[in-house]
Each structure stands twice: as structure tokens, then as C-alpha cells.
Image (cartoon, rainbow, N blue to C red):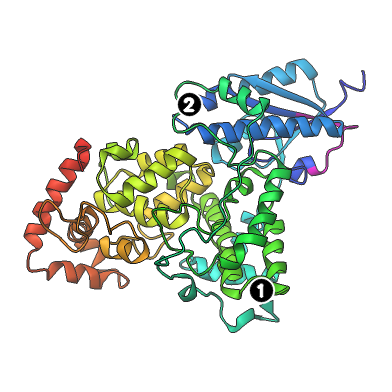
Amino acid sequence: MSKKKSLKTVWVFGDQLNRQIGALSEASPATHRVLMIESSEKISSRRWHVQRAHFYVTSMRRFAQELEQEGFEVDYRKSVSMRQGYDEHLAQFIPPNIVATEPNSYSARELLKSLGVATTPSNQFLCHPGEFAIFAEGKKALKMEDFYRWQRKRLNYLMDGNQPVGGKWNFDEENRLPPPKTGHDRWPVPKLVPLDKTDKAVLEDLPSTVWGNHPEGLWATTRSGALERLDYFVDQLLPSFGDHEDAMIQSNWHLAHSLLSPYLNIGLLLPAEVLDAAAKAFERGHVPINSAEGFIRQILGWREYIWNCYWRWMPDYANLNHLGANRPLPPLFTNPKATSMNCMSNVLEGIQQRSYSHHIERLMILGNFALISGVNPQQFTQWMWNSFIDAAEWVMVPNVIGMSLYADGGLLATKPYASGGAYIDRMSNHCRDCKYDRKQRVGENACPFTVLYWDFMMRHQTTFVKNPRIARQVRGAQQLSNIKDVQKTAKSVLNRLDQGLL
């Protein structure tokens, strides 16, 4: 048998693009061949945002080229499906052994089980589900804050012995300032890198079903590009990240957000190197504690918590619908021009242009609106998954089913994240020039957020009056002198929403 025939195979999925992840970290060109499969079935299975599809496929192709430059033989196989690509590889190379790192989706793990492919534990996250089980043992309810503190202690980030640096575990209050009245261009604009032949070849290969604006070089598709963006964030943006972390500004989509989640989610960056960079910048006095802690919490706390909740509760979790929300996805989500609401149209136009919006826009505008208007959680999950550059099932299912739409009945979040126009007015400048009046609850000019918020409380009053975190709002709705008129206005709002006339 030739040396080529005797090479073992390590199967690398498209969201494991790092030499240090799992099985690939232990492979060498002398002993292993790398299998990567670009599945046309996967790419054409849904209406991906063009930048989402381009980012994923281009990053895969470039990573394969980097492995070849290192000396690996790479079987980069374009096949109809993952299963067909695997079968074709097996037939051609007859490898004595094939191994993969634990995939990042439930369906991919089921596929490997059905094929009999061995897996090694994933180190793409800092808390493996086996370790999370230790944290969760004996707890009646899981809370992200408890997990975050456990992670801080366990991995020694921003710790002074057993106590948090700065004397507090989080600096939320310092990080919830409304948008500044002036200086909306104070944050550096993300740099663009011109597209090359590989980018253009991928775009030509994508199916006609993709949508959105074509990429302009905003998103890196190599590890070196991702590392450059990490350095840029830590040096230029992290110092001012905290204060306006939750603010929304009509004329500035990026503020001081890192824009690093896409790279973390496909392996171009690893969480420890991102956290280390932030922690070291704080230690040398370059970054204030509220910015360092706020950013570290996003990755060490929330991201890792979401990952582990996904594995703890899947597959049934994805189909939960505790509130019985069955409204089909409204037209405005696929056509921003189908609404006159400033906040919704601005965020949706941004997604059209960049396949991105920041976390508060996702939760308190998109998710909040889907929640109070009763959009079906599975349809909304699919739309989010199709739309965002950093999307993955493990990200979107818990964030939508649990955090945004309360479809899990409180497994992930202790209350529904519902709000009216007052919150959006406080944390953004969208309301100033809007057709709708956020202070009005009835009439044609009443803010849909305000109207639907109170209607939502009434629709689910029996459920929510028992929840101490939201019971006061339910009683407030019940005591409104014009609640019947509010509910009547809500019916009109929902009718216009369904027709694409809101």
C-alpha cells in the first residue's frame, strides 16, 4: 500500500476552521489527509443572505488552501450532500481511519453517528458540556449570571483571588447609557478589504436564492484577517465599548462593537485568545473595567452559556412554543420597505446591507417585535439563521426560543424581554423622526411597539401575572383606563402588519 493510501483522514467541518481545534490539532501532513465538503444541498437548502453564504464558503476554501501550503493533502470535495461527499472520499482513498472533531450542530453529530465516524472532544469553546454538567448539578434552575461567575473563577479572568477585580461581578449600570446627543461618528469606521478572485469565484457559485447586498470586504475570511480585526478592536474600540454598549443610533450601525462573532463561530478566532487580548489590555491600563468586563461577559458568560444550553436541551428545544405564537413571519422582515417604523426599517435595512445588527437591536427591536406581535418562533428562528453573518443553529435556537420569544416558558430567561416604545426612545434616536408616536396607545399614529406591548400583556395575563418579574406590568395593563381601545388598536396594527402596510 502506498503512503498516500495509508493516510488517515481528519474530517473538518466548515465552522471548525482552525489548526488548533480538536482532531486537526493532532494531525500532521505525514500521517493525515484532510477532508472538507462543500455541500450544494446545504448551500441551496434555504434563502441565505449572500454575505452569510459567501463568508462561510470563502473561509472554507481559503482554509483548505492554507492547509495545503502547510503540506497537507486536502480533499476539498464539492458534493451534493455531506453524506455523498463522505462516501465519495471513502471510495477514492480507502483511509484506514477517519476522525472528526465533535461538530457544532445536533444534525451534524447525528450524521457522524449514522456513518460510524469517531469524534474527538471539541475545544472550540471554553466550557465543554461535560464541564457544564458539573456546574448545573443539583440546581433547580440555571442562571447565566451564576454560570458567568463560575467561569470567571474557574478560568481566572478579572479576578483578585476569589473576588472580582473592581469589587463587582458586572458593570451593567455603567454600560447602559443612552446614545450620546452629539458625536455619533466618534467610533472608527470598520475597514474594508477589496474582494479578490476567490471572493468573486464564490459569489459566482452561489445559488440564485441568496439575497441582500453583495459583500464589500467588511468581513475577513482568513485567520490572519480575523486576527487583524481582533487587534484593531482591542486597540481602537474596546476602550470605549462599555458606556454605550446597549445604545442604538440611526446613523451609526457599529458603534464600538467588536464585530468578532463571525470569526469565533467558524473557528478563525478562538475564545481564549480573544479574552486574553481584552484582559491584557485592561491589565496594562488601556481599557477601563466597565468595557473590559462587559466584553468579557459577552464571550465568557453569555456565548458559552448559550452553547451549553443548546446541547443540554436539544433536539426538542427547537420546537417549543410555550405562548402558542403562530403568526406567519410578517412581510417587513423580508422587505424593510413594508413598514414606516423607523427602528424596524433602519435595523432591517442594515441587515440587508451587512448581514448584521448588534445584540440589542436583535433582542429589543427584532426579537421584541416578534414576541409582542406573536410571530411563530420556528419561523423567526429560521429567518434569523438565514440572515446573520454569525448565525448558527446553536446560536439562534436558544437566543430566539429562549431569550427573545420566551417560547421555552422560562428555561433560559426568567421573564419575556418585552417592551414598548418608551425603551426604544430611551436607548435610541429612532423615535425622533418616526411617523408613529411612542407615547400614543390608540389611534392610527400610535407606536406599534407601545400598542402591542400592552396588548401582549393582556393576551398572556393569566400566564404572566404569576411571574414576579413581570406581574407588575400585567397589573398595569389591566388598570389602563382605555385598555379596550388599546386592544382594538392592536387588532388594526396586526392586520396592517400581516398585509405589509404597517
Q: Nearer the viewer, residue 326 or 96?
A: 326
Q: Nearer the viewer, residue 201 or 487?
A: 201
Figure quadrant of residue 432: bottom left
Q: Which of 222 and 93 is in front in this view?
A: 222
Residue at 15 percent across and 60 percent down: it is: 441
Circle 2 — which element?
loop
Residue 122 visible somewhere in the drawing: no
Residue at 19 percent across and 36 percent down: it is: 499
Q: In this view, does 297 lie to the left or right of 421?
A: right
Q: In this view, does 309 lie above or below 318?
A: below
- Mark 1 and mark 2 lie on one chain; the one further toward the N terminus is 2
Q: Pick the quarter of the image with the C terminus.
A: top left
Q: Which of 202 and 272 is in front in this view?
A: 202
Instruction: Give coordinates of residue 140: x percent, y percent.
Output: 46, 68
71 part of magenta stretch: no
Predominant secondary structure in magenta? Answer: loop
Residue on which disc 2 sits: 45
Instruction: Give coordinates of residue 230: x percent, y percent.
Output: 67, 54
Residue on which disc 1 sits: 158
Figure quadrant of residue 501: top left
Q: Is residue 376 left or right of residue 53?
A: left
Q: Pick the quarter of the image with the N terminus.
A: top right
Tell me how many marks there are.
Answer: 2
Q: Specify start and end residues of the magenta stretch as a single range.
A: 25-34
Q: Which amino acid does label 2 sit on?
A: Ser
Residue at 15 percent across and 52 percent down: it is: 490
